[in-house]
Image: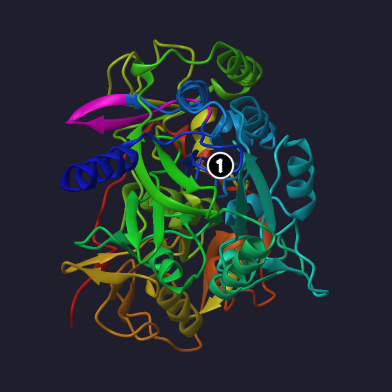
């Protein structure tokens, strides 16, 4: 009897060690592989990342297609490729200039299976969004964006069958979208809080026979806790959902690979620099996952052969764009970088250019509208230009081309001059610092509404509650600027003046539309090798 018992135990152990694969026609373990990127933003070309202190090229549509195909070969019957919004909008010049048609065409060529809607998908309004979605050869899903009649903008869910496994996918848009896109560009659609919507649809998908439930959510982590779990909206959503197996986040450029309760939570670094491979083993007899694991991997360009068809597609768009974008417009004495949580050289340069162009007393721009440094990551064909990227002539000074302006200012924002009362200016500055938090003794902020300024300086205390953080505002000469009714000549961009990023207090009817922000900056650059630096205009100080 002991020998028989040992034999039975051995059989059980060996059965438990058997690899996942196809069992009987209706049973056994099946493996589904989900490949995901976050916040791709139409990054057709590789970006530069640092690996072990060494600069490496990563991402780009042709490189990502090679990695996606590698996973498809590894699991031919069970792989699907997804992303969670913002695959277009806020894109590099070669896509944004052509109204992001190149981004969607590249998604088609890479073989995406499902996408949802991020805030930047609404940048050019609903009509443009619908035209781009009509070009896609894959479905969009979003459950929490609803019209006055309760109907969703696109279907709330989609079921994908892979190797006999029914994968139910729920899409979630960012609830903050109405505040961070141009007013009116989302139409009359409402953005509901995600968790109750997810729970409702997850239960419905289970009733309809879904074996796996995946959420594509355009919400992200603001940080990762010591135990690896996400902090911020993504973590809050993970803790609130029920009946979900995998939650894929987006929006914040943070790497997440963690388990929160029963939910596997994943988010990748943005623009295709990193991709996730999520393997889910499903017990078909019990119709549920028995194991789900993820790996986050850099999409290193020198580790694969870029897909030739996708590379040719991208090259074709570049050929159309170069005569427009490779035209020099000026020089900078240093690389002008931006920031969303502190004063930046780029912010000072742009705000100064606005103030000088219109003779204003004060100028301010939202940091989220400055999408890259000057010079940017755009790569002109002329390698004799002085550029900070490898392969170009040495600088400084650095040559700036029209493509840099398209890269830094992809939204087409236009200058607006207006009159502003001191109390309103204080309220705007308060709005700019309201979303940030103190982390490890330092102000941290990802919200695009942080204001870069010219003609004034301000201090704020992040320990104070939002709305009471600004402690002093002074004009450029040092005179106090009190929160009263005195008016000043001001200039900003139309997105901010019309209430974008939550600046609802500004539009007082005195605004005059001027010219595109990119043209203002181009004119400032033609004056010579322009220098700009951090001067102490914005200071976070505990009072």
538 sits to left or right of 6: right
> Residue at horizontal 73%, vertical 34%?
137
Is there any visible trace of residue 342 in the rendered image? no
Quick one: quadrant of the C terminus?
Answer: bottom left
Q: Position of residue 82 (x, y in %)?
A: 56, 42
Instruction: Please state which of residues 478 and 494 is positioned toward the viewer in this rendering.
Output: 494
Give the residue furthest to the bottom.
484
Give the residue furthest to the front.
1
Q: Position of residue 183 (x, y in %)?
A: 68, 65
> Residue at horizontal 65%, vertical 61%?
205
In this picture, which residue range is highlighted in magenta?
Answer: 44-56
Give the residue furthest to the right.
149
Residue picked out by circle 1: 82
Is there any visible trace of residue 444 in the rendered image? yes
Q: Quadrant location of residue 458?
A: bottom left
Vertical relation: 290 (above or below) 177: above
Vertical relation: 348 (above or below) 230: above
Q: Is residue 314 magenta?
A: no
Instruction: Please state which of residues 225 and 430 is positioned toward the viewer in this rendering.
Output: 225
Q: Quadrant location of residue 442?
A: bottom left
Total marks drawn? 1
Q: Position of residue 207 (x, y in %)?
A: 67, 65
Could you tell me which secondary element the residue under label 1 belongs to? strand
Instruction: Please state which of residues 447 and 331 is positioned toward the viewer in this rendering.
Output: 447
> Residue at horizontal 46%, vertical 48%?
370
Q: Quadrant location of residue 258?
A: bottom left
Please identify the dominant SS of the magenta region.
strand
């Amino acid at each position: 009897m002991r020998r028989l018992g040992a034999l039975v135990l051995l059989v059980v152990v060996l059965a438990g060690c058997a690899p996942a694969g196809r069992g009987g026609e209706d049973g056994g373990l099946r493996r589904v592989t989900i490949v995901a990127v976050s916040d791709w933003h139409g990054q057709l070309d590789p970006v530069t990342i640092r690996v072990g202190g060494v600069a490496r090229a990563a991402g780009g549509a042709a490189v990502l297609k090679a990695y996606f195909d590698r996973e498809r070969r590894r699991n031919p019957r069970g792989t699907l490729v997804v992303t969670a919004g913002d695959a277009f909008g806020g894109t590099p010049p070669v896509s944004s200039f052509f109204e992001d048609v190149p981004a969607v065409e590249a998604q088609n060529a890479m073989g995406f299976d499902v996408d949802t809607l991020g805030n930047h998908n609404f940048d050019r309004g609903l009509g443009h969004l619908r035209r781009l979605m009509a070009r896609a050869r894959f479905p969009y899903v979003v459950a929490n964006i609803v019209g006055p009649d309760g109907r969703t903008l696109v279907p709330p869910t989609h079921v994908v069958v892979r190797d006999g496994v029914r994968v139910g996918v729920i899409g979630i848009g960012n609830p903050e979208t109405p505040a961070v896109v141009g007013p009116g560009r989302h139409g009359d659609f409402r953005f509901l809080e995600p968790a109750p919507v997810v729970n409702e649809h997850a239960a419905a998908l289970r009733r309809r026979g879904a074996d796996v439930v995946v959420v594509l959510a355009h919400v992200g982590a603001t940080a990762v806790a010591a135990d690896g779990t996400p902090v911020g909206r993504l973590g809050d959503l993970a803790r609130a959902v029920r009946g979900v197996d995998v939650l894929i986040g987006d929006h914040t450029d943070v790497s997440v690979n963690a388990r929160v309760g029963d939910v596997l939570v994943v988010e990748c670094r943005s623009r295709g620099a990193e991709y996730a491979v999520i393997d889910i083993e499903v017990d078909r007899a019990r119709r549920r996952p028995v194991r789900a694991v993820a790996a986050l991997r850099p999409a290193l360009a020198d580790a694969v052969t870029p897909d030739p068809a996708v590379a040719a597609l991208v090259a074709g768009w570049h050929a159309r764009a170069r005569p427009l974008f490779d035209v020099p417009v000026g020089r900078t004495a240093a690389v002008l970088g931006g920031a969303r949580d502190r004063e930046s050289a780029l912010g000072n340069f742009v705000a100064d250019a606005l103030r000088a162009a219109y003779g204003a007393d004060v100028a301010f721009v939202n940091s989220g509208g400055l999408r890259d440094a000057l010079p940017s990551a755009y790569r002109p064909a002329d390698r004799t230009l002085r550029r900070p990227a490898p392969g170009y002539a040495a600088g400084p000074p650095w040559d700036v081309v029209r493509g840099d302006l398209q890269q830094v200012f992809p939204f087409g924002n236009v200058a607006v001059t207006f009159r502003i009362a001191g109390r309103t200016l204080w309220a705007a500055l308060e709005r700019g610092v309201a979303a940030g938090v103190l982390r490890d003794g330092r102000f941290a902020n990802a919200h695009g509404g942080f204001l870069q300024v010219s003609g004034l300086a301000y201090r704020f205390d992040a320990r104070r509650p939002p709305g009471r953080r600004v402690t002093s505002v002074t004009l450029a000469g040092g005179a106090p600027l009190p929160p009263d009714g005195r008016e000043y000549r001001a200039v900003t961009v139309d997105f901010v003046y019309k209430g974008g990023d939550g600046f609802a207090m500004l539009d007082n009817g005195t605004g005059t539309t001027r010219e595109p922000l990119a043209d203002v900056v181009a004119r400032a650059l033609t004056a010579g090798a322009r220098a700009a630096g951090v001067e102490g205009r914005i200071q976070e100080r505990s009072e």
